[in-house]
Amino acid sequence: MTRVLAVCVAVILSSCVTTTTFNGAAKVPKGADGCRAICDGWGMQLAGMVQLGEYSDGCICEVKRGGPATSSAGAVVPPAAGVVMQMVAQAQEQDAMQVQMQMQQQQMLQQQFYTPPPMQ
């Protein structure tokens, strides 16, 4: 009886699944020239193309190269340095939050096990 019920539930749940749909063309019209036009339309430049089997392909666009990025101080900063600096800041923030949580937990434990001083 349990197996029949399990099979019925599985059949009902599998019939509720919606199908995935895709909109637009599977291939980029005019190949690399089409990709170049798409990237230009986004204010970017064509970096490459990708082929996903025989069914579809796609464009890889990147920010146009106009020169090295500079900081407010005028020093040259590689684009990845900003990402690394952000990751370091996030890690420091997480560490600070973890220390704060540990301190709060210790305070809660101390409050739980508080014993009043002996009465005289």
Image (cartoon, helix red, strand yellow):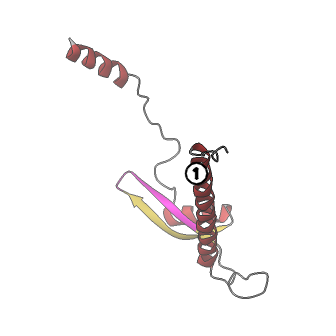
- Residue to which mark 1 is pinned: 105
Chief SS of the magenta region = strand
Residue 83 to residue 9: above or below:
below
Segment colored magenta: 53-61
Q: Is residue 45 visible?
A: no
| Amino acid at the residue labelled 1 | Gln
Q: Which residue is drawn at 74% across and 81% down?
A: 71
Q: Could you say whether the residue bearing mark 1 is in a helix, strand or loop?
A: helix
Taking depth in this image into account, of 85 and 112 the one nearest to the observer is 112
**x, y percentage for residue 79?**
62, 77
Q: In which quarter of the image is residue 90?
A: bottom right
Q: Which residue: 57% across, 56% down?
A: 102
Residue 49 counted in the magenta span: no
Residue 84 picture location, percent across and down: 59, 74
Indicate left or right for 1 with 40 as reference: left
Does the magenta-highlighted stretch encompass residue 55?
yes
Relative image position of residue 80 (x, y in whole percent): 59, 76
Q: How many marks?
A: 1
